[in-house]
Image (cartoon, rainbow, N blue to C red):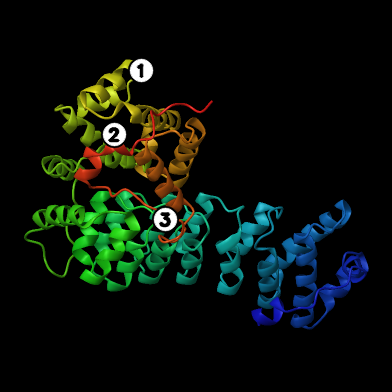
Amino acid sequence: MLEAVKTVTPRTPERVPDLLTPEGVQAFLENPSPEARAEAAAVIAREYAQGGFSDSEMELANTILETLAVEGEDLVREALSEHLKDCETLPVNLVRQLARDSVESVAVPILRCATALEDDDLMEIAGAGQVAQLIAIAKRDELTPEVAEALLESRNEKVIGALLGNKGADLPEPLLNRIIDEFGTFTSFHALLVDRPFLPLTVIARVLLLIPEEMKERLLERHELNAKFAQLLTRVSQENSISRDANKAPKAVEAPKLVQVLSQKDGLTPVLILRALLTGDLEFFESAMAVRTQMTVEPAKTLIYSSSEKGFKGLYTRANLPSELMRAFRIALDYIAEIGRDNAAFWRAEDTREIVKQLGNEFDEVCPAELRRLIGRLQRRLTNQSDKDKRGSVELAFSKAGNKNRGAQQKGPLRPAS
């Protein structure tokens, strides 16, 4: 029935106002044919979404739509949902009414597309909705960690699959680890994990133990890691899960342990540390700064987030990190201070996007090649471009040669744009 509604021929402009008169409304309500009522509802909804009504017509249209959303037949409500799903001026109470409809074909278009729905609305529906409704929420263009966590509570394979496959869903490390804990052995999820825009290194270490050999190359290419670095991550994960049940996912790797191993193998590079900071992997970043300065984590964190400029500068110098990257670290930390460090547990892709934007505004083309490449990689992740599109040459996350030749790669000092 819904397909028939989608193909309704639009009313001519002369006929639309006829529906918004007392006589037209009465005739509409008394029409015994659900198909005819659905056609008329589709016409009103289409014109409403296009903003074609006067103020007085809009008021009457709101009344009609609100009545139909409650009392209309399924076919009528389906017509409203399909033609109003992208309407940004729709009253929020009407959006919520349609989103909470018990009929899937009514609720799903609104849940998938309507921007008026807030996180509280989505989480409430996620807690009580049917699978089709939950999948629709999981496929929304943008999805916050809070809503993603509510969807995870469903523990439904189709819902979690839709969530993992949505590049617009913000899935921070704790949520990814929960998904791997419960669904890591589901082979249908492996490609979805590999293709996520961002994966913390601790999560990549777990995924490497889950996926077959032929998929590892894809993981390395997607997240721009070389084989040597992957071998190191795999070993850390294997040691961490040495006695694991073969039917269960490998144990989560703690960031401090991963940092220690990377440090011992000359893998704790400046670009790797900056990558962690820019993508909200703060536990890794904090641990890395502590190890590089031979401090414990808590004193290092105090200096990292110190309101005094000298605090982090002194720590940075002691960590023997390149002076030309100092400003990039500072920009990221200033942004984190602005949003509140507590938000890092639910880091959003928008946070990385904003930092990358600030870096782009701050520095001109004369900046370290490694920083330029890192920003380029993050921008591709943020815009969901394929790995082969506009790739150019990229710096691998683990490369001793790259560290030794850093000076030769740079085109000049990092300096603010004029």
For badge 3, the amino acid type reads: Arg
The label nearer to you, 2 versus 3, is 2
The residue identified by callout 2 is 407
Give residue 9's quadrant in the image.
bottom right
Q: Is residue 412 above or below residue 303?
A: below
Q: Is residue 198 above or below residue 324?
A: below
The image shows residue 297 at horizontal and vertical percentages of: 19, 30
| Residue placed most toward the observer, 68 or 192 | 192
For badge 1, the amino acid type reads: Glu
Give residue 44's quadrant in the image.
bottom right
**The furthest residue to the left:** 243
Q: How many marks?
A: 3
Write the residue at 60% across / 54% down.
Answer: 115
Check disc 3 and report its element: helix, strand or loop.
Answer: loop
Ranked by sequence position, the earlier of labels 1 and 3 is 1
Check disc 2 and report its element: helix, strand or loop.
Answer: helix
Write the residue at 21% across / 58% down.
Answer: 227
Separation (CA) of disc 2 from disc 1: 26 Å
| Residue placed most toward the observer, 132 or 51 | 51
The residue identified by callout 3 is 391
Write the residue at 29% across / 18% down.
Answer: 311
- Tell me the quadrant of the picture where the C terminus can be found: top right
For badge 2, the amino acid type reads: Gly
Q: Is residue 394 left or right of residue 366?
A: left
The image shows residue 129 at horizontal and vertical percentages of: 48, 65
Asked whether the residues under the numbered discs 2 and 1 touch, taking CB atoms below 8 Å apart as contact, a structural biologist would say no
- Tell me the quadrant of the picture where the N terminus can be found: bottom right
Ranked by sequence position, the earlier of labels 2 and 3 is 3
